[in-house]
Image (cartoon, coloured by chain):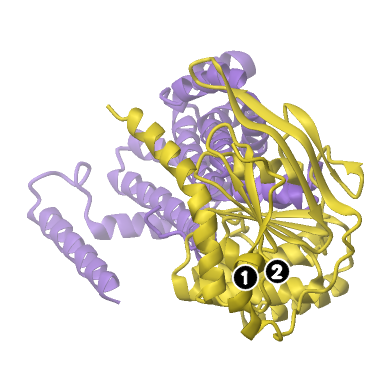
Chain colours: A yellow, B purple
Amino acid sequence: MIPSSNPVTASDVYAADNRSKSNLALVRPDASPAEPKVCVRNLSLSYSSTKGDRLLALDGIDLKVRTGEFLCIVGPSGCGKSTLLHIITGLHHPTSGSVSVDDKIVDGPSTSRILIFQELGLFPWLTVADNVEFGLKMAGVSSSERRDKAAHYLRMVHLSQFRESYIHQLSGGMRQRVALARALATEPDVLLMDEPFAALDAQTRDILHDELERIWADTGRTIIFVTHNVREAARLGDRVIVMTFRPGRIKREFLVDLPRPRQIEDSLVAGMARDILEELRAEINKSLEQEYRHQP
Amino acid sequence: MKPAFRQLVFYALLLAIWIVVARLRIWPPYMIPSPRGVFESLRAGFSDHSFWIAIVISMKRIAVGYAISVVIGIVLGLILATSDFLEQTLGGLMVSLQSLPSICWLPMAVLWFGLSEKAILFVVIMGSVLSVTISMEAGRKQMPKIYSLAARNLGANGLKLFFYVLFPASLPYLVSGLKQGWAFAWRSLIAGEMIFVSLGLGQLLMMGRDLNDMSQVVAVMILIVVIGYIVDGLIFKTMERRLQDRWGLSPAS
C-alpha cells in the first residue's frame, strides 16, 4: 500500500498544459497554512455485525484539514467515508482515536460543523425560509435577525422567490440549495457534505459545482466533501483523498493545484480525475468482488 | 363537480326507492317507516328540544372523553417509543387489546364506577386511546432518523428537539390515529349510551325501540351518522388536507 504522505501535484504532471491557464485568477482566499482546522488522529471504528463478529469500518485514519481548504474524499461504497463525516460532525463516536477542531476535541454535534446529508434531511413541515432559519431559531436568535440572515443566504443560493414554498414543491437541485443555505445560515467553520449531488442530473450538478465553488470562495468556509465521483472531486477539491475498501484507510492523497474557477470538462481536471480513478479502481474492484461473493 | 353530481343522483335514487318501498306497504310502518314519517320525527324531536338536549349531552361526553384519551394516548405512545422492551411487551398488548370491541369494557366500568358518567367516559376512553397510542408510537418509530440527526446538528436538543422536530415529524401518523380514535370514541359513546339509560343520542335510539317508533329510530340513526360525518369532514379532513399540502403526501397515503 502506498503511504498517504505521497502527494502528487497535478501542476507537476501537467505543467506544460497548465502554462496557458496559469494567469487565470485564483479566487480562493489565501488561508493560513500553519494551523489545521480539523485534525483527525488515529481514528478507528468497529461495530458488531448481525452475525456477531466485529467488523472494522475505519482503520487508523489520520487527517489534517487546513482552514479554508476544500478537501474531497473519494472511495468505493462501503469504505466508511460517510461514517467518517458523521464522526467529524459529532453525531457518531469513534471506537478509538479522536477528532479535534481548533484544538478542541469533538464530543458531540455543534453548529460550528454542519453536515449536509446525502438525503438532505430537510424538514417537510416547514417552509424553505423556516428550514433555513431552523439553526438560528434553536440558538435563540431574534426573529428579525433570523429573517435577515435567511434572506441573505437564500439570495446566495438564488432561492429568494421560494422562501414560502414547501420542500416537496422544489426540484432536486433546489432542495440541494435549501440544504446549503440551511447549513450556511448558522455560519459554521466547517461544512461537511456527504455525496450531496449524487442524485442530480449532470446539468444541475455542473451549475451547483459552480455555485458551491463561488460560495466557498466568498465565505471562506472549510469544506470536507465526500463523493464517489472522481471528476467531481477533481473539479472541486484543493486536495483529494482516496480511501480503501473495508476497512477504510487513507490510501493516497492528491493535491489538485489547478486554477479556479474550474470547469468539469477542463482537460486538467479530466487528467487529474483519471489519475485519481486509477488509484481508486483497485478498491472499487474489491468492493464489487465482495458484492458478487455475497450473491447466491 | 362530477363526484358531487354522482352522489346527488345516488342519494336521490336511494330516497326514491325508499319512498316506493314504503308506499307499497309490504311491511308495516313500524318495520319500514316512510321518509315522511322520519322527517316528522326529526322535526318533532328538534322542536321539542329533546334532540338538541341529546346532542349536547352526547357531544359534551365525547369532547371530555376524547380529549382525555388524546392526552393519555400521546403520552403513552411517546413512552412506548422510548424502548424496544416496552414496545414489544406493553405495545404488543395494546395492539391485541384493540381487537376488543370497546363496549366490552362496560361491565367492568359499571362494576368500578356504577351507572355513572364516569362509566361512559371510561368506555369512550378505552375505545379511542389505543388508536392514538399506537399511531403516536408508530409516528415516533417510523420517523426518518435523519430528521433528528439534522436537527441535533443544527443545535436542537431536549424539549426543543421534541417540539420542533420529533412531534411535527410524527404528525402524519398521529393525525390518522386521531381520526381513527375519534371514530372509535363516537361508536363507543353511542353504544354505551344505548346500554344504560343516561340521556344522549344512544338513549334516544333505545327509546324509539321501546315505543315501537321506527321513525324515531331511523331519525336518530341519521343524526348519529350526520354528526360523525360532519366532525370527520370538518376537523379531520381539514387537518389531513393541510398536512398533505405541506408535506406533499398524496391523498392515498
Q: Which of B118 and A251 is in front in this view?
A: A251
Amino acid on which the number 1 mark rests in the picture:
Arg
Determine which residue is flagged by label 1: A177
Q: In this view, does A275 lie above or below A243?
A: below
Residue A117: x %, y % from top left:
62, 53
Q: Which of B10 and A259 is in front in this view?
A: A259
Say if mark 1 contacts mark 2, CB within 8 Å: yes
x 58%, y 13%: residue: B111
Residue A24: x %, y % from top left:
70, 85
Amino acid on which the number 2 mark rests in the picture:
Ala
Q: Mark 1 lies on which chain?
A: A
Residue A9: x %, y % from top left:
67, 62
Q: Nearer the viewer, residue A114 or B23?
A: A114
Q: What element carries label 1?
A: helix
x 53%, y 37%: residue: A245
Q: Disc count in the image?
A: 2
Q: In this view, does B216 lie above or below A78?
A: below
Q: Give left or right: position of B37 versus A254.
A: left
Q: Which of A49 and B3 is in front in this view?
A: A49
Determine which residue is flagged by label 2: A181
Q: Is residue B119 above or below residue A198?
A: above
Residue A262 visible in the snapshot: no
Q: Mark 2 lies on which chain?
A: A
Q: Is residue A12 above or below residue B159?
A: below
